[in-house]
Image (cartoon, grey):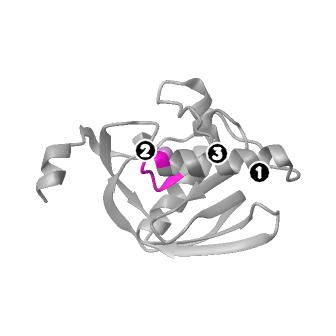
């Protein structure tokens, strides 16, 4: 297991557009495994390659239903709307209200460069949109309605 350093808001790399993966290599497979390890270690539900300093169009997501690897993802369909709190491993300790589609469908390639179609509602749709934004250099804070707030851990523990 190899953990990578998660870049934080203010780091220029998070504002850059990632480049498509042309072919799978052992090095990129290692990157994907490291991204999964890093996401789980940080209790995140998603991570984009740019967040670990690599400008490639790769995201990993796990909303508690198993790991999903998306290489060169393209959102092909969205519908509905949901408004709720969102956070990001690159913006630690903060949360903000963001409106996203309720449903999202994405076409991508998996870690073997096999085509995959992934769709989801609720948290999965939110994660897909949030992570794909990262690949275009967009952080969720740009979509936040109202103020970015501090996460109140004590309050969470009481719930
Ligand atoms: Ni994020």
Whole-percent x and y of residue 44?
45, 51
Dominant SS type (magenta): loop
Q: Determine which residue is flagged by label 3.
A: 34
Residue at image x 41%, y 71%?
Answer: 122
Quadrant where the image shows the N terminus: top right
**Visible residue check, residue 119:** yes
Q: Is residue 93 left or right of residue 110?
A: left
Q: Considering only order in the chain, which callout, 2 or 1, is on the residue closer to the N terminus?
A: 1
Q: Give the CA separation, mark 1 to mark 2.
A: 23 Å
Q: Considering only order in the chain, which callout, 2 or 3, is on the residue closer to the N terminus?
A: 3
- Give SS at disc 3: helix
Q: Is residue 73 left or right of residue 8?
A: right
| Depicted 16 relative to depicted 109: above or below | above
The answer to which image quadrant residue 74 occupies is: bottom right
Q: Is residue 84 left or right of residue 50?
A: left
Q: Determine which residue is flagged by label 1.
A: 29
Q: Is mark 2 within 8 Å of ligand 1?
A: yes
Whole-percent x and y of residue 58?
69, 51
Q: Is mark 1 within 8 Å of ligand 1?
A: no
Check residue 67 in the rendering and tell me which mark sits there, or answer none.
Answer: none
Q: Crowding near pointer 1: few (<14 within 10 Å), some, many (20+)? A: few
Residue at image x 51%, y 49%?
Answer: 39
Q: Give the CA separation, mark 3 to mark 2.
A: 18 Å
Q: Determine which residue is flagged by label 2.
A: 88
Q: Is residue 48 within the magenta segment?
A: no
- Give SS at disc 1: helix
- Give SS at disc 2: loop
Magenta stretch: give its range: 41-46
**Visible residue check, residue 133:** no
């Amino acid at each position: 297991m190899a953990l990578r350093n998660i870049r934080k808001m203010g780091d220029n790399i998070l504002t850059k557009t990632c480049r498509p993966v042309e072919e799978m290599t052992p090095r990129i497979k290692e990157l994907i495994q490291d991204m999964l390890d890093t996401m789980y270690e940080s209790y995140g539900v998603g991570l984009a390659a740019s967040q670990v300093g690599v400008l490639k169009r790769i995201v990993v997501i796990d909303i508690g239903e198993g790991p999903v690897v998306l290489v060169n993802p393209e959102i092909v369909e969205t519908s509905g709307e949901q408004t709720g709190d969102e956070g990001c491993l690159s913006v630690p300790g903060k949360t903000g209200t963001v409106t996203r589609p309720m449903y999202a469908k994405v076409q991508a390639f998996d870690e073997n460069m096999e085509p995959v179609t992934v769709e989801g509602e609720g948290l999965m749709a939110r994660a897909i949109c949030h992570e794909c934004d990262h690949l275009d250099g967009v952080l969720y804070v740009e979509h936040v309605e109202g103020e970015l707030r501090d996460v109140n851990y004590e309050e969470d523990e009481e719930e």
